[in-house]
Amino acid sequence: LTQDELKKIAAYKAVEFVESGMVLGLGTGSTAKFAVDRIGELLRQGKLKNIVGIPTSKKTQNQAISLGIPLSDLDSHPVLDLAIDGADEVDPYLNLVKGRGGSLLREKMVEGACRKFVVIVDETKLVKHLGGSGLAMPVEIIPFCWKFTANRLQRLFEDSGCVAKLRTCFENGDPILTDNSNYVVDLYFKKDIGDLKAASDAILRLAGVVEHGMFIDMATTVIVAGEMGITVKNK
Ligand code: DER
């Protein structure tokens, strides 16, 4: 099975949790895309009714509009029934790294407002410890004096051999702008992050930081699609 087929299997499994009348958080990324497509398909077939979607990015908003999924926002629906979204890393305690697609702020706002947050991944996303895989742990920061903030972030974790890099557009090297007109600094760790709560608090204390991509204690269920089949992990 290809990685895409595994993502689709996990996504379709998660949509089985969706019931008519729900207010849903719609995730962002290649795995969540399959879930949003599936919700649109079931609505079209009349198998799902009265669904309201709250998108976690402009990209997902556009996808939902093209599928005819009725949309709303957190102002109108401060509590949601269920969110379905992907993740970049999942540790054994269901803590996540998200945001390599740059949507971490709106994802965290929407998914933090949900009664249930179902994460959908293929098995390559499973890690023993967050941050240890040498892949990016994203932090959304304001553009004002971004170098100052990036250096403070890097110094926070210098004993973990952390390197902070501004996320730039591949084509022209300009800083990537999030849906909220902010920048993203990616933190690369040589060792795993260790105490996630302490790392989260230290990052969020820095004025100029908006949010980071560690989703601690937020997922209620993680659906993993692997060569051996589907595993559903509950908190
Ligand atoms: O950027 C994000 O938060 C995405 O949800 C990411 O965590 C997963 O993206 P993928 O499904 O394309 O791997």
Image (cartoon, rainbow, N blue to C red):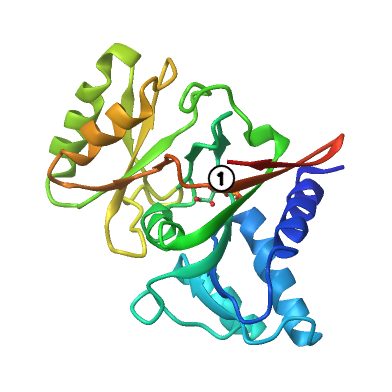
Say few, some or many: other residues with alpha carbon within 10 Å of mark 1 (under 14 / 14 to 19 / 20 or more): many
The quarter in which the C terminus is drawn is: top right
The quarter in which the N terminus is drawn is: top right
User: Element under label 1?
Assistant: loop
Say what amino acid the circle numbered 1 marks.
Ala
Residue 123 vs 189, above or below: the answer is below
Residue 59 vs 123, above or below: the answer is below
Q: Residue at x 13, y 36 (%)?
A: 148
Residue 167 vs 110, above or below: the answer is above
Query: Residue 106 location in percent, x, y?
Result: 39, 61
Query: Residue 138 location in percent, x, y?
Result: 38, 41
Judging by the rendered image, the residue that carries numbered circle 1 is 87
User: Of 164 and 138, which appears nearest the observer?
Assistant: 138
Asked whether mark 1 lies closer than 8 Å to ligand 1, one says yes
Q: Taking 60 as reference, is 9 left or right?
A: right
Q: Residue at x 40, y 55 (%)?
A: 108
Give the image quarter of residue 207. Answer: top left
Q: Taking 172 as reference, is 85 left or right?
A: right
